């Protein structure tokens, strides 16, 4: 790797082309993590659809194999070129040797369809690989390795961009970089390759769309880790060496399947896709910061379908033609609301393809063609939100601006039961109708949060900060609220029987119609508090302070200790 980074700066300066530079403005006041996520997600999801909104992947047999030469795919803005012997290892089999025979024909074929090629750059040739054994044998030994010398990568990119110029409308700078199947280098190494490729491509074709290495979103942990590292490089360098972020948004294979009833629900599957994307978007906002202009460049989703088995042992789902048409409509509607500026359906095939849950093939009767034509002509329908029995059901556009903390989606009706959210800063968050049963929220900050119908039953909330929070019908029957801070809260009808509030702080709190019976308030501070019509029977009040407190209509029968 001695030579890997040595040529990056010289390439950029030589060509006189630089990536889009970003300077983050200072913010008037420091935002809470929740507010930061809201601001960043709003920016990210505000990108308008591009001219490439309705794009396609096409199986390599279409228009190519014997007997299929005359078969044309449905019309699309761009046609993605991948899985058809046109990768780096195919085009550049030896150092300094290029074989254009297949790529020439593939590009001419796409042009004959009236479309524009979108080429994926990747799959390292074994001769160029730092680790000659890295990668899945299906794509070739060494294919997931960074190159030993970045100059070999630069030569390949320069050769492709120079040969085809404006005939290639866009490039994807690597395929599924968060999967070790395709990439086993570091995020920093891939970022360096993106930097040099960007300058080379733009020198040959300034109008080309240069898309970031794609991320598979259904592996949320993997997607978040790689995105954090890769977007961190963008933040550190002050520039994004690409024109758009890139994802592959297949949801889990069994998304939308109710195994109890055997029914499939397209809206549930599409919502799983949306949630995967929202999770990834949160990681992006966290890495870049809410003010970064890199949040406004848009997103390409260059592979999406449903029912593909995995991850792991998850089974796939075969969707009916009717359900498949609904899924296509939902997908493009959701893409618009998520700030995805181009979505490439994967894929149109000559015959049905068993890998995919939603089929669209010539032999199958072109199952999705009517919906595709309608989408291209008029956009997605307004029937996004068919009623489904799902806690993830989305009902309003604003529901997509969803902050995620660890694995917890902050939106009404969501269950984060059992989640590990210790020290999470949820200040100012709307936690209404959420379920935190059994969650670990030790030292969590919930200052100023909205807690209407929020359930904290059996949660661990020791030293949690609720100061300034408001709520009605909050279930506070946690395992422990010892040393928690409830100063200046305003709670109506809170329920917390038999709960430990040891040494808790209730200064200037307002509580009405609460039920704290049999709870332990040892050495708690109620100075300046207003407690109205609240059940305090059988409470333990030793060492409590009530200086300046106003207590009315409340019942303390059986209480032990310092009553007001």
Image (spheres, rainbow, N blue to C red):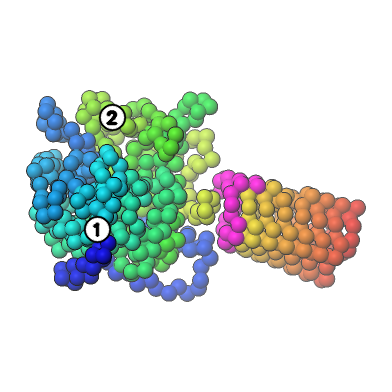
Q: Position of residue 202 (x, y in %)?
A: 18, 62
Q: Which residue is mark 2?
A: 353
Residue 520 belongs to the span the image colors magenta: no
**Residue that appears at 24% across and 53% down:** 129
Q: Quadrant of the C terminus?
A: bottom right
Give the camera-side residue of 487 and 8. 8
**Residue that appears at 28% across and 44% down:** 344
Residue numbers of the magenta segment? 411-438
Q: Is residue 150 left or right of residue 512?
A: left
Camera sees residue 433: no
**Residue that appears at 36% across and 47% down:** 179
Q: Is residue 470 left or right of residue 209?
A: right
Q: Within 10 Å of the Cα at label 1, are there few (<14), some (14-19), or many (20+) other Cα atoms?
A: some
Give the camera-side residue of 230 and 168. 230
Q: Position of residue 199 (x, y in %)?
A: 20, 64
Q: Position of residue 362 (x, y in %)?
A: 21, 28
**Residue that appears at 37% across and 61% down:** 231
Q: Which residue is mark 1?
A: 148
Is 174 located above or below residue 26 in the figure? above
- Disc 2 vs disc 1: which is toward the camera? 1
Q: Position of residue 371 (x, y in %)?
A: 29, 35
């Amino acid at each position: 790797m001695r030579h890997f980074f040595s040529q990056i700066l010289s390439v950029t300066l030589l060509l006189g082309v630089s990536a889009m530079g970003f300077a983050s403005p200072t913010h008037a006041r420091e935002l809470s993590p929740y507010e930061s996520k809201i601001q960043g997600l709003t920016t990210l999801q505000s990108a308008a659809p591009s001219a490439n909104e309705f794009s396609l992947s096409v199986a390599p047999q279409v228009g190519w194999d014997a007997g299929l030469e005359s078969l044309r795919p449905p019309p699309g803005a761009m046609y993605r070129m991948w899985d058809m012997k046109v990768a780096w290892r195919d085009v550049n089999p030896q150092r300094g040797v290029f074989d254009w025979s297949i790529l020439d024909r593939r590009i001419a074929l796409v042009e004959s369809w009236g479309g524009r090629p979108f080429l994926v750059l990747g799959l390292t040739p074994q001769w160029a690989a730092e680790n000659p054994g890295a990668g899945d044998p299906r794509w070739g030994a060494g294919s997931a390795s960074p190159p030993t010398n970045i100059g070999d990568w630069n030569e390949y990119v320069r050769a492709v961009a120079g040969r085809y110029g404006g005939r290639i409308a866009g490039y994807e700078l690597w395929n599924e970089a968060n999967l070790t199947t395709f990439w086993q280098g570091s995020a920093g190494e891939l970022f360096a390759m993106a930097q040099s490729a960007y300058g080379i491509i733009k020198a040959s074709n300034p109008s080309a769309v240069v898309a970031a290495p794609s991320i598979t979103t259904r592996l949320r942990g993997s997607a978040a880790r790689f995105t954090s590292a890769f977007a961190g490089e963008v933040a550190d360098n002050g520039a994004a060496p690409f024109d758009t972020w890139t994802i592959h948004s297949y949801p889990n294979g069994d998304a939308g399947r109710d195994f109890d009833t055997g029914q499939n629900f397209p809206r549930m599957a599409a919502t799983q896709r949306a949630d995967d994307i929202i999770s990834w978007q949160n990681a992006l906002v966290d890495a870049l910061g809410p003010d970064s202009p890199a949040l406004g460049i848009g997103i390409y989703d260059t592979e999406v379908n449903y029912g593909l088995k995995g991850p792991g042992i998850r089974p796939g789902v075969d969707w009916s033609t009717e359900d498949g048409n609904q899924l296509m409509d939902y997908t493009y509607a959701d893409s618009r609301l998520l700030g995805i500026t181009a979505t490439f359906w994967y894929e149109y095939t000559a015959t049905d393809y068993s890998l995919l849950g939603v089929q669209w093939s010539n032999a199958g009767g072109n199952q999705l063609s009517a919906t595709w034509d309608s989408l291209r002509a008029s956009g997605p329908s307004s029937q996004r939100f068919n009623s489904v029995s799902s806690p993830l059901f989305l009902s309003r556009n604003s529901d997509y601006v969803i902050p995620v903390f660890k694995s917890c989606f902050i939106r009404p009706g969501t269950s984060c039961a059992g989640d590990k959210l210790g020290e999470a800063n949820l200040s100012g968050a709307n936690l209404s109708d959420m379920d935190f049963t059994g969650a670990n929220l030790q030292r969590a900050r919930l200052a100023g949060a909205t807690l209407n119908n929020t359930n904290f039953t059996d949660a661990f909330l020791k030293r949690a900060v609720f100061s300034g929070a408001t709520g009605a019908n909050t279930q506070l029957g946690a395992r422990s609220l010892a040393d928690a801070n409830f100063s200046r809260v305003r709670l109506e009808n809170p329920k917390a029987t038999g709960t430990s509030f040891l040494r808790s702080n209730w200064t200037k709190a307002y509580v009405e119609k609460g039920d704290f019976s049999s709870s332990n308030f040892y050495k708690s501070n109620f100075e300046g508090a207003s407690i109205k019509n609240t059940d305090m029977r059988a409470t333990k009040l030793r060492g409590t302070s009530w200086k300046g407190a106003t207590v009315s209509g409340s019942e303390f029968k059986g209480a032990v200790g310092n009553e007001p």
